[in-house]
Image (cartoon, helix red, strand yellow):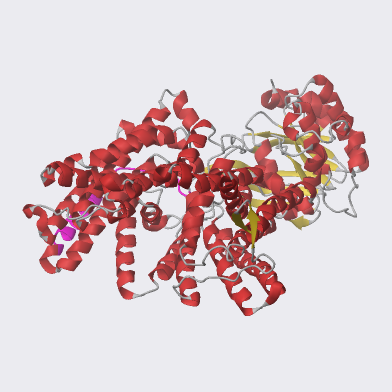
Amino acid sequence: MAFYVVQFLTGLASAASLFLVASGLSIIFGVTRIVNFAHGAFYMIGAYIAFTLTERFSGAFGFWGGVVVAALAVALIGVLVEMVLLRRIYHAPELFQLLGTFGLTLMVEDLVVLIWGPDDLVGRRAPGFKGAVDFFGQNIPSYDLFLIVLGPVVLGILWLLFQRTRWGVLVRAATQDRDMVAALGVNQKWLFTSVFAVGVFLAALGGALQIPRDAVHHAMDLRIIVEVFVVVVIGGLGSIIGAFVAAVLVSELNAFGILIFPKISIILVFLVMAAVLIVRPWGLFGKPEAAARKTPGLTVNPWRPLTSNERLASLAALVIAAMLPLFAGNYALTVGSEIAIFVIFAVSLHFLMSVGGLASFGHAAYFGLGAYGVAFLAKMAGLPMIVCLLLGPLLGCMGAAVFGFFAVQLSGVYFAMLTLAFAQIVWSIAFQWVSVTGGDNGILSIWPEKWAASPSHFYWLALGVAALVTVALRIMVFSPFGYALRATRDSVLRSEAVGINAKRIQWTAFVIAGTTAGIGGALFAYLKGSVFPDNLGISLSVDALVMVLLGGVETVSGGVIGAIVYKALNIWLVSQTDLSKLVLGGFIVLIVVVFPKGIVGMLEMLAQRRRKSSPPGSPLIAKPIESAE
Amino acid sequence: MKLTVQDLNSHYGPAHILFDIGFEVGEGEVVALLGRNGAGKSTTFRSIVGLVAQRTGRIMFEGKDVLARPTHEIVRDGLGYVPEERRIFTDLTVEENLEVGRQPKRPNAPYWTREKLFALFPNLGEMKNRPGGRMSGGEQQMLTIARTLMGNPSLVLLDEPSEGLSPKIVEQMVEAILTMKKEGVSIVVSEQNLHFARLISDRAYIIERGRICFGGTMAELDSRPDIRDAHLSL
């Protein structure tokens, strides 16, 4: 019994940091509507700076002072980030803000290694809390008890801050209606900056307080951010009490999941999250959002099929790409195949995002399922390659059919989070079901048959499939189904009012996108000769998002260009510099700030400008279009 | 002149909404902006306080052109705005809603305290701690006006204050607007209801399809039934 109590208390102690970080994210989202992907990075910098300060200054004052100063310093960095980066993109579609903060995260990951080195750093124990308390023969670290008390104390302080101060009232008002707050004479800029500073302070404090419990390392940002997303979604975005309850729930699930269901401990949390989202899509303590006025896009460029000249140009580009084996070596061809595969992957997500308006954060799940589908068929059933390539993606199709059914019941950020949760579930199954998937060791030696074995043949195969898939999806965009899908994207209510079954249309789009991603995954398995859980991991999902946004989410085929540029740049950078993430992250941030329409969007605009010699008032970064009353 | 609007043109995206709007409001005057649904009344107000980004022309408030300035600065200079949709903060209590609107005392404008506003709208005083979301439409309308008055404006843009209210509440609203006028607040009120406008206004402008097509005193408007019928008939 005592053991279970101790386990429970350990869970509560872990909840403290999680709550700090999650409440910060929640507050920032509430007011600015930014899902701050960099929140984990701020948490990590908080831990690193606190580590340095507490090592440098001794004594109790040095430790506690160091922790607080570290959090304040990171809050200051947050203020800079908000003023320099975020202020420029508040009016961009919300995914762009996610992309920008993701770029920031990449940069920070390299920067901390540059400054603090790649090794794990073990911090000092907290003065005054070094020992352990005996509880019926079980030891509880006294620092854990400190954290258990700290959580509710911070909750209380935040509650007072929001209920009893003018700042708090303004923040709550702005959470509901930013423009009205401005129309009452409040300077939103500073309100946003201060909110961001408070949120980042909480994240950094959460990180700084972890150093006596955990080693500081350069991957702690991604680990926490996923957990924080889960907490915030379960608790309800924007609700601080929700963040607290959910942080406790998630931490206890982690603490007891290991004991009770060791086999599925990792997915337990995500199962709970999926269940909560399905029953209460707005979270336990959140409020159902009034059908938010959609942020209109940056462009009002109507889509149109390619003109015959443009078709010829695309065909010419394809022919040139097909001639690559004439002058390129094997390495270049392998890179080319990989890029072609990622074009398929990016185009599939692009279809879901641009045409369907559904931003999936877990699209790698279907890519990876396609890869595993091939692996199962080739290794277990021993089927020929052609059959595997045709049937393997069906696993992605099935996954998309099941998960998509639930996912399309939600929209916006919650849709994104649910898809993320599903992807994590699939990843955990691949990771933990060792007897079938090989777990972390993956499934090896899935090599293409002779006809496709040479790099040039495989390249042509990948290129051909990529071209086919792109054309097929484009045809679909301009089919009646595509029009219906775009109608649901622009307004679910209005599309239903004209008789479109919005959910079914979106579900169909989800399945199409998932199957297409599965095709990419199937080819990927043969390219690499192996399948690993990483093939359906979060970072791959994020890669896909970046490729789509980079290409331009408001374009018809931006995903193609986005994938080529991102993947090529990525591979090239990794070969050129140890700081590839720093450069890539900087590049992404730059794109977000300077070319918010993505590469293709920008090219389209330049072309249009040349055509009608620049109408008055169309700067490179167009002003957002207000919705009419 | 308290407020002078000249050649105001506004766009929503590619759509041109307002065409060369011009009107004036004198110190302490109540001016009605009359027009049918969709004529451009709300857009005119939103353009004046900077909530419509694409606009050109001149908006002189107390002798200074405010067109290029951000919304919160215009409002802080004493130009209050009461939106048609009321836009009460539903999660905040009456007191908290008023707190959001609070601005420092201004030398050239009447000073409003919570007590004064609760005297002006007695209903609000009885529900200080009620969340805005649990108030009736009339109570919300009172709260949205009170909230703007907390900023001690010298001029208020009132967007359709009588819309959707019961006759009894409308009467109260007339009283409140006349009290505001007596205190020295200049008011521009947009209305579809000519009867309501007549009770409170000194002068009126008529707006139709984004253009001003009449300006004059209420008596002049009454002497031109042709105009009234062409642009306002119900």
Look at the image and tell me whether residue A342 can be seen: yes
Would you place residue B166 above or below residue A78 in this image? Answer: above
- Which image quadrant is residue A208 in? bottom right
What residue is at 51 percent from the left and 52 percent from the top?
Answer: A92
Q: Is residue A308 magenta?
A: yes
Q: Is residue A444 left or right of residue B139?
A: left
Residue A231 seen in the figure: no
Q: Quarter of the image containing the N terminus of chain A?
A: top right
Q: At 69% from the left edge and 53% from the top edge, which residue is drawn? A: A149
On screen, B56 above or below A131?
A: above
Task: Please state, as top left, top right, bottom left or bottom right, where the C terminus of chain A lies in the image.
Answer: top right
Total number of numbered labels? Answer: 0
Query: Residue A376 in the image: x percent, y percent?
Result: 21, 44
* Position of residue A141 in the picture relative to residue A376 (left or right): right
Q: Pinpoint residue A76: horizontal percent, then vertical percent.
A: 64, 67
Give the x, y percent position of residue A69: 67, 70
> Is residue A428 shown left or right of residue A21?
left
> Along the line of sight, which residue is nearer the eye, A444 or A84?
A444
Q: Which residue is more in the foreground, B178 or A510?
A: A510
Image quadrant of residue A578? bottom left
Magenta includes B19?
no
Q: Which residues are magenta?
A: A298-324
Residue at the image point whose x is 50% and y is 41% from the top:
A414
